[in-house]
Image (cartoon, rainbow, N blue to C red):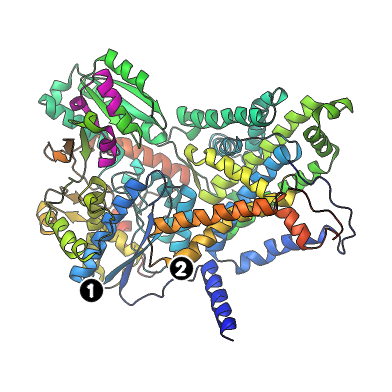
Amino acid sequence: MKNLKTTVKAAVAALAIIGGVGLAPAHADEQYFPLQSYRVGPYAAGGTGFFGGFIDYLNLINTRDGGVNGVKLTWDECETQYEVERGVECYERQKSHPNAAAWNPLSVGIAYAMIDRITNDKVPLITVNHGRTDSTDGRVFPYVFPLLLNPYSETSGIVNYLASREGGLDKLKGKKIVVLYHGSPYGKETIPIYDLLAEKYGFTVQQIEVPHPGNEQQSQWLTIRRAKPDYVVLRGWGVMNPVALKTAAKVGFPASKIVGNVWSNSEEDVIPAGEAAVGYTAITTQASGQQYPVLQEIVKTLYDQGKGNLEDKKRIGSVYHNLGIVNGILNVEAIRTAQEKFGKRTLTGDEVRWGFEHLKLDEAKVAALGAKDLFHSINVSWDNHEGDGYVTFQQWDGKKWNVVSDWIAPDWKLLRPIIEKSSEAYAKEKGIKLRTAADAEGTVTTN
Amino acid sequence: MAAITSQPVVSAKLPGWIAPLAILIIAFAVVPFIGSSYLIEALLLPFLALSLAGVGLNLLTGYAGQVSLGSAAFMAVGAFAAFNFNLRVEGLPLLVSIALAGGITAAVGIVFGLPSLRLRGFYLAVSTLAAQFFVQWALTKFGWFSNDNPSGVIDAPKLTIAGIDFDSSTGRYYFSLIVVTVLTFFAWRVASSQTGRNFIAIRDNETAARIIGVPVLRTKLLAFALSSFIIGIAGALWAFAYLRTVEPAGFNLDRSFQILFIIIIGGLATIRGAFLGAALMVVFPVVLSRVGSFLLGDLFDSGVLDMSQRIVIGTLIIVFLILEPDGLTALGRRLTGRFRPSTPEPVG
């Protein structure tokens, strides 16, 4: 009899799983985050750091504040291995859970596959620091948010930083910059922007491709040595980054003249290069280190109690971990913003979208959140979904990253027309009517 | 390649067409009404696309004996060709775009099939790797293929045929199912025709085939063309009906191996093998992962769970191939008693 019962139970469980209803019932006041994380596979270092930081921050809000104004934050993880079809499967699996606040896949490929789907569902899709550049235009992409930085702004931020090292934008004239990029759609995305900026500021740019995965770069670096550039911008990915730094050292190009982009800026990119990485500088939207109050609280509230998400405590405050924390802050504050308008309750995805579109954190607010100097500020609006993030630059000293620049603003005005041209072309291809400010104020209040 | 080439001459109680017909009736008339959107979007759509790719590869590898590791490349060609036809030729119906994409893929397949005239076995497999790397490189290198989209990723158009919107999950399912049914029927007809017998003759003994008058050169290229045609359309289904986006990196060598494993596990030189293999390779990991996270999700993080699932799947595949080297099809036949007890077991 007992056996029969177990069998029936197992059968019911199996059916529930297959039917996609095997998820916990909704609580009265909760806001759910579906996390399409990746903890195995080639990009696990980034995935564990980012999702570790994100979960740590959500956990901090629950433990310290009892949720956002009493609304508990919940989440579950689904492993994607950074693969698009696994991400889609996870999306289908997790979307049946009610009260979803926002999706955060940290993968351009998965984000692309989800744009149509989440637009139908009316739930925001956050691609912090990366993503599809033209989704910055909220008129065409109402539910997609490449918060803080898109690839074009990153390019402009790097050029502005190099100008500040030279003593002003006019000093860039006649300089020579080599861009060493990963041979993938991601790597090639900024080619036209470097050309545009080179023309505008009068420097010459030479863009050299490194075929994926980039574990052999002898010929590229010999070309660079012959070209004698003033700077090399490293637009790398994965193993390409340490190999670039090591090969540069081998051909005698100083690491201090190499500047990395946002996917070449982590500990995992420099530690394997050893001594060759000392003096290397890279862009970031969030400084690394544990000295910020919010990190101190995470250590005290979670890690000291054995509740932290990272397995290796040494990674607390690393680049990806802090990116996850900043992403957590942005998501939570968007919910808080929306609650002020719609009430302190569980919100629909569309209401959270409204919250993101009114997410305004100036420096004072960032400091109040315990994140002063961790990141600068954000100012999202209904048509600007990036939110004017500032960037800073960190130099690797062999043990840790040290901030070596002020907060630098990319040239958003210059980039906006290019972004609009691309998004309008997309709108035309897909038959999308451009949204207006009035459309953005209307929200769907039922799930 | 110890494959079963001809149906055993056994008096089955039911005519052979009953089972496929019953499956089709269930697939068309029952599944869309009881299936949740999860079942359709996350399981059936990738299953249909990969099954079709398996059917295509089985014509080439299972029937004609030419091992290919370029299937994902041919899928990519099909997806990007369909995208470009749809984008650049005003007013071209979607189905015509997809059919033309199949034609383009067939042409590409013939080009990469040329080495098969001189190379065999592993050497041919290695030479088809060229297709895999070349296609991915070309799609990344030349922005024209992705309509100069800065990030190289393309968006699939809406699925609309003759004014009927197929964009819902049920619509996508019907769209895929109809395409897969038609092409599978086509592949089955080819396999049971003179052409199919030529394929088998070349696979079993090329010299003998030449002596009895099989045009080896033409037949091999025809195998590449037909197989690529079907795989290309499978690629378009994968991109348009399932993912709704494509990046070249999504069609990498792993996908080629996955399709090859589908037909090996399902059963070489059988049509149903592709479906059984795809079911195992697509559905089983998902079910395992859901059961795993349902039962153990609170105890381990998703990374640990995923690694243990890989171990389970890997072990099962090894055990299965040792016990049943001829694939799921042979297992199914044995279970339904279509092998007589007196039939000697396949040695393996």
Q: Is residue B31 left or right of residue A249?
A: right
Residue A137 in sight here:
no
Q: Nearer the viewer, residue A260 or B22?
A: A260
Looking at the rendered structure, the secondary structure element under dot 1 is loop
Q: CA distance from mark 2 to mark 1?
A: 27 Å
| Camera-nearest label, 2 or 1 | 2
Q: Is residue A375 magenta?
A: no
Query: What residue lies at 22% left-to-right and 35% top-to-bottom?
Result: A282
Q: Is residue A42 above or below residue B304?
A: above
Residue on which disc 2 sits: B294
Q: In the image, which disc is placed on residue A70?
A: 1
Residue A154, located in which quarter of the rendered image?
top left
Query: What residue lies at 15% left-to-right and 61% top-to-bottom?
Result: A297
Query: What residue lies at 33% left-to-right and 40% top-to-bottom?
Result: A420
- Looking at this rendering, what residue extends furthest in the top direction? A226
Q: Nearer the viewer, residue A309 or A286?
A: A309
Residue A35, located in which quarter of the rendered image?
bottom left
